[in-house]
Image: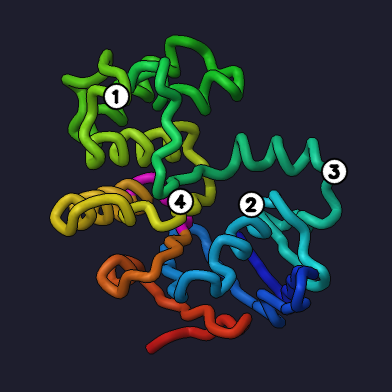
Amino acid sequence: MLILDGVRKGFTNAAERRVLDDVSLTLERGEYVAIMGESGSGKSTLLNLIAGLDTPDCGRIEFDRVDLGSLSDDRRTLLRRTQMGFVFQAFHLLPHLTVARNIGLPLALNGTDRALIHSRVAELLEAVGLASRAGSLPSQLSGGEMQRVAVARALAHRPKLVLADEPTGNLDADTAQEILELLRSQLKRDGAAGILVTHSAIAAATTDRLYRLQRGKLAAFS
């Protein structure tokens, strides 16, 4: 479903450097993998490339048999909106929307029928244990509750791929473990593929397969 083949990316600044160097990865539907690396190792750059927010200097990224490099900016935006879900460390919930409306936002943006949005949001609220908080605003939630909303929102439109960028970095250890277990269970339930980017070995242990990104090189870790 996702193929990275010989991907390279560098940045020119005071000292030109190659952030990603000949990175290759294959991810099948339903697989959940972790990519570990220290801060500045290129993990977020790699996610941006996979999401089509940036383009590699060379190499190929193919998503669902489509070469991202062949798509226009508008086509890549549409692909992200309809086929990908995102979970961030900082939650990125819209503060003026209720929990239910935050979760339903991807569906609304994709023009989903209102009745179907209501049904899917109710299903996810139950799944993440927040049915009683449907009408609450993000400011009324704990960090763990906000991240539960973010997980539900990422899965609302049943994406084929979910990208999670340090999703538990702002949470205490117990809450982080709950979120990691929730994310894994929901991915498996929906049959979505997932990539978890993290510096935490504990977080990485909840995935099916582990890779390490170091000095621009991506390697399977055993």
- Looking at the image, which is closer to me, 101 or 18? 18
Determine whether the residue tagged by mark 3 lies in a helix, strand or loop. loop
Classed neighbour count for the residue bearing mark 3: other residues with Cα under 10 Å, few (<14), some (14–19), many (≥20): few
Q: Which residue is mark 1?
A: 139
Which of the two labelled residues, at mark 2 and mark 3, occupies the earlier sequence position?
Answer: 2
Asked whether residue 31 is in view, the answer is no
Which of the two labelled residues, at mark 1 and mark 3, occupies the earlier sequence position?
Answer: 3
Residue 217 sits in quarter: bottom right
| Labelled disc at residue 72 | 3
Query: In the image, residue 148 lies at what x, y percent?
Result: 29, 38
Q: Which residue is mark 4?
A: 192
Question: Which of the two marks, 4 or 3, is nearer to us in this view?
Answer: 3
Determine whether the residue tagged by mark 1 lies in a helix, strand or loop. helix
Which amino acid, by three-letter code, is at mark 2?
A: Ala
Q: Mark 2 to mark 3: distance in Å?
A: 13 Å
Query: In the image, residue 144 lies at what x, y percent?
Result: 23, 41
Which of the two labelled residues, at mark 4 and mark 3, occupies the earlier sequence position?
Answer: 3
- The residue under the point 33% across, 33% down is 149
* Residue 191 among magenta residues: yes
Q: What's drawn in magenta, residue-wise?
A: 189-194
Which amino acid, by three-letter code, is at mark 4?
A: Ala
As displayed, is residue 54 above or below residue 76? Answer: below
Q: In the picture provided, is 222 more to the left or to the right than 145?
A: right
Q: In the picture provided, is 134 more to the left or to the right than 3?
A: left
Question: Which of the two marks, 1 or 4, is nearer to us in this view?
Answer: 1
Which of the two labelled residues, at mark 1 and mark 4, occupies the earlier sequence position?
Answer: 1
Question: Which of the two marks, 1 or 3, is nearer to us in this view?
Answer: 1
- The residue under the point 59% across, 42% down is 83
